[in-house]
Image: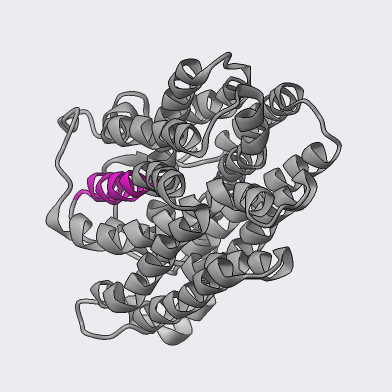
Amino acid sequence: MGKLKESGASEMRPVRRARIAVAAVFAVHGAVTGNFATRIPWIQERLDLSAGQLGLALAFPAIGASVAMPLAGRISHRFGARAALRGLLALWTAWLAMPPLAPGLVWLCGALLIFGAVAGTSDVAMNALGVEIENRLGRSIMSGLHGMWSVGALTGSAAGTVAAHADADARLHLAIAAGVLTVLGAVACHWVLDLRSAPEEHPPPHFALPPRSALIIGAVGFCAVFAEGASLDWSAVYLRDVMDTSPGVAAACTTAFSCTMAGARLVGDAVVARFGPVRTVRTGGVLATAGGLLVVTASGPALAITGFGLIGLGIAVVVPLAFAAAGRSGPAPSQAIAGVATITYTSGLIAPAAMGSIADLTSLTISFCLVTTLALGLVAGAGVLRTPAGTDATDSAPHPDPDASTSRATLS
């Protein structure tokens, strides 16, 4: 019996190590977003872009992601999960240096198109690995992994806040950040699971329609990601233009938003285990709606920052729950995850353009009324995350399957 326990512990050790490695990958991925988001006002001012032009440019990362994400499964099949993630993450981190170098709107759109393509494919790859580890461990970890993404975004936005407050040139700031994050990402990828397809397994199609389950789950994720993308991309601009704050205070609003999301996601697995996904998402929808109302009615920057914080708190666990549900919804987890990711990134595609267009026609305050409405949609749509057994408590957690994926995965 003692030898069996020792053998089991030895077999689980690489999985636990891989969990730490994937958590680090999530943090690096988030840090890229955090650094970039805080310097959007600098790029807008340098290129003299209107709100509509900025909204157009910020739609291109989501366009690139939506087009490229269906390729993630084939890339992982061809090179193996570890090598695919290593290459895609390196492209994502290194490309952070390119957007601030754009000499005009067209060049910025092109840089952001590639930026989004490598962001989306690396996102699918790391989430697929996260779901695989979750299934092997037999307990929920996806909220925690996304919490590490938010920790990375918080760290990146904090660095961006310092750089913005010091009036540093974003070209230098983002080039340094790109170099550091590329190295950190390469180190983390060394320890992730090296999943490989069996020789007889046919490669997935270049483009595959998402399964029906992914469409339903993705609808809830759509609302959350719209609110997240709008807040992350436009919160600093909102504080600067509507609340008439300094660049440093405006960037700090993005940091506050990232902070509440990080904290909520880090405790999200425990909350979901206690209350279930449906009640958790419904309560989050109420908080996010209250935050949106506070943003659009705020009379000063402190109230607006509090509102953005509540939005982050309310939507924090929605996307992790959507990815986890997609990964367990059928026989092809990567395809389902890619389907949900495509839907959520489509939301990210719509959000910047919609926010900028509405702001041009009316005001940025009116734009956030749309965010508030979609946050309310989480309250109505949370039921789609209910488990097949009709419960939404601890039995929604994955259960260990010692035989799962042994035919297509190797550990090293």
Considering only vertical position in the picture, is 29 above or below 98? below
Which residues make up the magenta segment? 332-348
Q: Residue at x 64, y 48 (%)?
A: 241
* Horizontal and vertical percent position of residue 404: 29, 55
The mark total stands at: 0
User: Residue 216 colored magenta?
Assistant: no
The residue at the far right in this view is 166
* Horizontal and vertical percent position of residue 242: 63, 54
Instruction: Please state if 154 lies on the left or on the right of 57 as rendered.
Output: right
In this orientation, which residue lies closer to the viewer: 396 or 121? 121
Q: Is residue 234 at least partly visible in the picture?
A: yes
Instruction: Please state if 312 lies on the left or on the right of 319 as rendered.
Output: right
- Rendered image quadrant of residue 283: bottom left
Q: Is residue 81 at least partly visible in the picture?
A: no
Q: Residue at x 75, y 48 (%)?
A: 158
* Horizontal and vertical percent position of residue 115: 48, 27
Instruction: Please state if 250 lies on the left or on the right of 188 as rendered.
Output: right
In this orientation, which residue lies closer to the viewer: 340 or 169? 169
Q: Residue at x 67, y 64 (%)?
A: 305
* Horizontal and vertical percent position of residue 140: 44, 68
Q: Main secondary structure of the magenta part?
A: helix
Q: Residue at x 30, y 56 (%)?
A: 327
In this orientation, which residue lies closer to the viewer: 361 or 214? 361
The colour scheme used here is one colour
